[in-house]
Image (cartoon, rainbow, N blue to C red):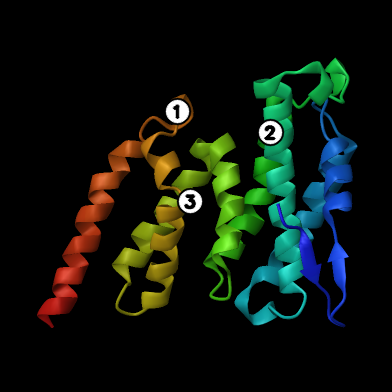
Amino acid sequence: MNTTANCARGKITDISYYIEWIVSTLGGGSSTTMRHLGQMLAALESYFVDVNTGGHSERLEAFVRGLAFSFVRRINRERVRQRPCDNHHRSAALLTEHDVDAFVGATLPVGLQMVQSVSGSSASRAVIKQLASMRPDVVLPPLLERVNSALETHREHPTKLSLSLGNVACLADVLVDPGPRYRQGPTHVIPLLVREVSFKQEDMAL
């Protein structure tokens, strides 16, 4: 995970320490850190709107991306690897399902704004991918809704459609195999492909 970003004067600032500190203090089902983090992410959301992008955008993107990666890494350490030497948290401080719900809920609005921005990079889609790996039932529906909306207005807003399709393509593996939380995910694949082929044929006929 690369969390080094250029600041305005050309300096290199490593923000991974701050990210690790924030994620390490989450957990236990009622973290004060989570409440403050949610407030901060809500305040940052407007900075990813196209008209507000600037020299700060790269660092903010690196921060949000780093949060998502670090949070997923901690879940894997606590629930998948499950080796005592990897677990630095007391049992009462481990991440709960409520913590995961809260983190995804707080980060998703920012993630959606990042991937919908014209200036957004492919790396920003990694945030959505990490969130979808934890809560596909929360992340996939709004993305699919944006695709359907973009398909309806693809002639007026072709860039919007391109961004929306790119976002879903990034999550193809999660969409096809989302697990028990979103079993209807695979049912969206064929309709999306059919609609995309249909409007491309329409464009070729013009």
Mark 3 and mark 2 lie on one chain; the one further toward the N terminus is 2
In the image: residue 8, left or right of residue 164 = right
Report the mark closest to the observer, 3 or 2.
Answer: 2
Instruction: From the image, tell me which residue sits under label 3.
Output: 142
In the image: residue 198, left or right of residue 176 = left
Residue type of the residue flagged with mark 2: Val
Cα gap from disc 1 to disc 2, whole angstroms: 16 Å
Instruction: From the image, tell me which residue sits under label 2.
Output: 100
Residue type of the residue flagged with mark 1: Gly
On the image, the x and y values in percent for residue 51 come to 64, 81
In the image: residue 135, left or right of residue 91 = left
Q: Are marks 3 and 2 in contact (CB under 8 Å)?
A: no
Label 2, secondary structure: give it.
helix
Location of residue 179 by image quarter: top left
Asked whether residue 6 appears in the rendered view, the answer is yes
On the image, the x and y values in percent for residue 190 come to 23, 46
Instruction: From the image, tell me which residue sits under label 1.
Output: 179
